[in-house]
Image (cartoon, rainbow, N blue to C red):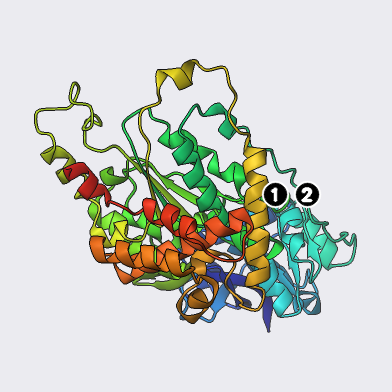
Amino acid sequence: MVARAFTVAFEGIDARLVEVQCAIAPGLPGFAIVGLPGKAVAEARERVRAAMAALQIALPPKKITINLSPADMPKAGSHYDLPVALALLSAMGVVPAENLEKVVALGELSLDGTLIDVPGTLPAALSAAETGRDLICPQASGAGAAWINANAVYAPQNLHGAIRHLTRQSPLNPASPGTIEDIPASKDFKDIKGQHRGKRAMEIAAAGHHHVFLLGPPGSGKSMLAARLPGILPPLLPEEALETSLISSLSGAAPAGGISRQRPFREPHHTASIAALSGGGRDAKPGEVSLAHNGVLFMDEFPEFPSMVLDTLRQPLETGSITVARVNAHVRYPCRFMLVAAANPCKCGHLQDPGRACNQAPVCGEKYMGRVSGPLMDRFDLRAEIPPVAWQDLSSSEEGEHSADIAERVYRARDLQTERFKNHPGIASNAMAEGQLLEEIAVPDTAGRDLLNQFSDKFGLSARGYHRVLRVARTIADLEGVPDIQERHIGEAVSYRLISTREKIAS
């Protein structure tokens, strides 16, 4: 007789059903796990053996074989502990086989039988609901997994509790969705003195989901501007929060007890590798671009990142998704994020200050910014120069505009876009519009079109750059609440692309 339990294997943000089969046969005592188990899965037999010993359950002195089906798919992770234990208990006659048919289980076992939280409970709950099964997971994961709200989620504290639930000795109550109090942003735009153009660029970026490049000397406030951007972004929509939480759950970074509606803010160090940024490793885990999905990816000291790492951003910025291809995994992750990049004008940062610049200026600036490829730079909708803060602004007691006031304008602009794109699935902001749709929503008046054509002819604007100017102009008009794109909107939009960073340095 073969006993069966069910769990999942992760392929990107999707969870694929895995059947855990257990057979106990006569022969020399042994405990084998087959079906392409990873190192952590193979070690499950020792944790299961110790957990059962803690419950004073003796394993039969026979040959125990666990098969993970489909056997040709690699299995990785410690979440196989619980389903392996349940399949074994069913084969021993402790847990009725019929009670495991409609259950998906996952969880790591400690040596005393306590269930330990594991990554991926949220996509596992979604997969279980799609197959009409309930979910059994560790107690720490129950509140978050219950947000799926399409099936029952049971969260025992230990293996003993799971056994008593499945044998109906002490049935558990379904877990309830946890609530997370979103912490108000502690960083406010009012703290930034001066830098009105930088603040305006961040407001436009937030309103239309545009990518921003900030250029300025050290201490000018580039990082402060980026850190305050999440405070003016609208909360995640329910479907966005779920998708973002699926990725966080897979990476083990999901908040305990529920789902947050705050947008993620990721800031990788410039020593990050390609795998850290785009995703990878042996199990093709999500990288920073996916962890920033529906949020902000801030890359400070942008030219300091290796060129190969920077160029991996080009395709995700256009498509909003990334495929991680490895020898034993080929998975796709969503990565629709806002990129905010900050850079000094040169290695020392004082290129534009003759009294402090090095003796290699301006060649040092050209070489420094030459680390960022032209195609990547062309993907930034907004490029803002952040000059040093004037001492008059620093000594002023006048308080700047609060983030809440800026956020109110951003929310109104986003509401206009939600209404505009309600019949276009997958498009939520002006930055995502393209093709015929962009031509329909971003039609400038005659004066604005003439200005844009003159600008394109004089500065050799690429087709991508031309369309990005139209998207930014559409967002500026939305911030004003006007339906038509006028000359002043085009004028402000082109001012953020007027001179490329490299040309500005060279001049």
Rendering quarter of residue 14 = bottom right
> Helix or strand or loop: what does disc 1 sit on?
loop
User: Which residue is painted at 53% across and 77% down in the image?
Assistant: 440
Rendering quarter of residue 504 = top left
Residue 184 is situated, as x and y percent measured from the top left of the image, at 68, 38
| Viewer can see residue 483 | yes
Amino acid on which the number 1 mark rests in the picture: Thr
- Neighbour tally class for label 2: few under 14, some 14-19, many 20 plus, Cα within 10 Å: some
On screen, residue 458 above or below 191: below
User: Which residue is painted at 45% across and 33% down in the image?
Assistant: 195
Taking the image as shown, residue 392 lies to the left or right of residue 326, namely: right
**Closer to viewer: mark 2 or mark 1:** 2
User: Which residue is painted at 31% across and 32% down in the image?
Assistant: 217
Residue underneath mark 2? 179
Residue underneath mark 1? 114
The C terminus is located in which quarter?
top left
Residue 478 is situated, as x and y percent measured from the top left of the image, at 59, 59
Residue 167 is situated, as x and y percent measured from the top left of the image, at 85, 67
Viewer-proximal residue, 470 or 273?
Answer: 470
* Comes first in the chain, label 2 or label 1: 1
Taking the image as shown, residue 64 lies to the left or right of residue 55, namely: left
- Neighbour tally class for label 1: few under 14, some 14-19, many 20 plus, Cα within 10 Å: some
In this view, the residue farthest toward the front is: 447
Amino acid on which the number 2 mark rests in the picture: Thr
How many numbered discs? 2
On screen, residue 71 above or below 503: below
Viewer-proximal residue, 449 or 69?
Answer: 449
On screen, residue 232 above or below 291: above
The N terminus is located in which quarter?
bottom right
Distance Cα–Cα, label 2 vs label 1 = 24 Å
